[in-house]
Amino acid sequence: MDVTVVLPCYNEAAHVRAELERICAALDGAGYRYEVLAIDDASTDATLDELRKAADALPAVQVVRMPRNGGAGTVRRLGSRMARGEIVVWTDADLTYPNERIPELVHRLREDESIDQVVGARTSEQGSHRLLRIPAKWAIRKIAEWLAGQEIPDLNSGLRAFRRTVAAPYLRLLPAGFSCVTTITLAFLSNGHGVAYVPIDYAKRAGRSKFRFVRDAYRYILQVLRMIMYFNPLKALMPVALLLIGVGAAKSVVDVVLHPVRLATNTVMVFLTGLIIASLALLADLVVRSRPDA
């Protein structure tokens, strides 16, 4: 099996069959051996019925039903573990991503062994809450770029292809929600795996958005911070520790000049806080480097 497409489906009855037909037509035209895992995430509409009808007409489609709603991250994690293809493709069923370009992403991986993941980098923002989402996503992306030490054109694109064997150790890190795509990007970049970006158009979604700005933005931020601590705690903690130690040392000199017989309490507290954070940073780095997947 060359390719496995993992397609989370939650209340997509009106358009999911059209999306499946588009994906299958593209991969049939490219000549790949493939499967499409259409996973119904406990939809409350007729999505499951539409998936079963599509599977009868499209032999490559396999329908998987979740007993309860687990979120896009849970679906993608389980689907990636079930995948038989050498390359796993993530995309959405809401007609937003140009899924006819999936063979292009797969071809890029197959022709260049130095690349382990290809991400469709969106050239526009079509989602809801645009005035809030654009600056929030920019800030989170800058934090991620600082962690990875390189530019990331699109941190949370839902269209991507990656090598299944490379991604396997990181699947357990995927959270249940939308930030799973952020996690897989940072996991690859933080461990030196090659990631390439292909510019793509991004259409207005069909149906109702499942994105909730406050809840999902909060989860994005937490997940980026978690990834920093998981992959590179020294980069996050040591600058703060050294700054506090430096401020404490400088202020101790001032205290000795002004009051030769004593140090101010806040000077001692700042210096000790820096030492504690530095110790935690070194301990966290030791734990990270002792992991099998480090």
Image (cartoon, rainbow, N blue to C red):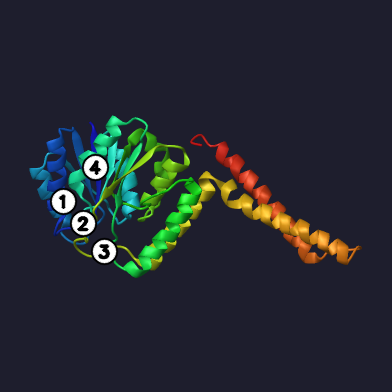
Dot 2: within a 10 Å radius of its alpha carbon, few (fewer than 14), some, or many (20 or more) residues?
A: many
Inspect the image, locate mark 3, and give the three-letter code of the amino acid beneath it. Answer: Ser
Q: Is residue 115 left or right of residue 225?
A: left
Dot 3: within a 10 Å radius of its alpha carbon, few (fewer than 14), some, or many (20 or more) residues?
A: few
Disc 4, SS = strand
The image quadrant of residue 24 is top left
Disc 2, SS = loop
Dot 4: within a 10 Å radius of its alpha carbon, few (fewer than 14), some, or many (20 or more) residues?
A: many
The percent position of residue 130, horizontal first and vertical second, equals 32, 67
**Which label number is shown at residue 141?**
none
In the image, 66 versus 136, the foreground residue is: 136
User: Who comes first in sequence, dot 2 or dot 1?
Assistant: 1
The residue at the point 64 percent across, 44 percent down is 283
| Whole-number angstrom distance, CA of label 3 to CA of label 1 | 16 Å
The residue at the point 63 percent across, 55 percent down is 240
For label 4, the residue is: 5
User: Who comes first in sequence, dot 2 or dot 4?
Assistant: 4
For label 1, the residue is: 19
Residue 86 at least partly seen: no
For label 2, the residue is: 94
The percent position of residue 260, horizontal first and vertical second, equals 91, 63
**Up/down of 115 relative to 184, above or below:** above
The percent position of residue 167, horizontal first and vertical second, equals 38, 38
Q: Tags 2 and 1 in contact by the CB under 8 Å rule? A: yes
| Whole-number angstrom distance, CA of label 2 to CA of label 4 | 15 Å
User: Who comes first in sequence, dot 3 or dot 1?
Assistant: 1
| Whole-number angstrom distance, CA of label 4 to CA of label 3 | 22 Å
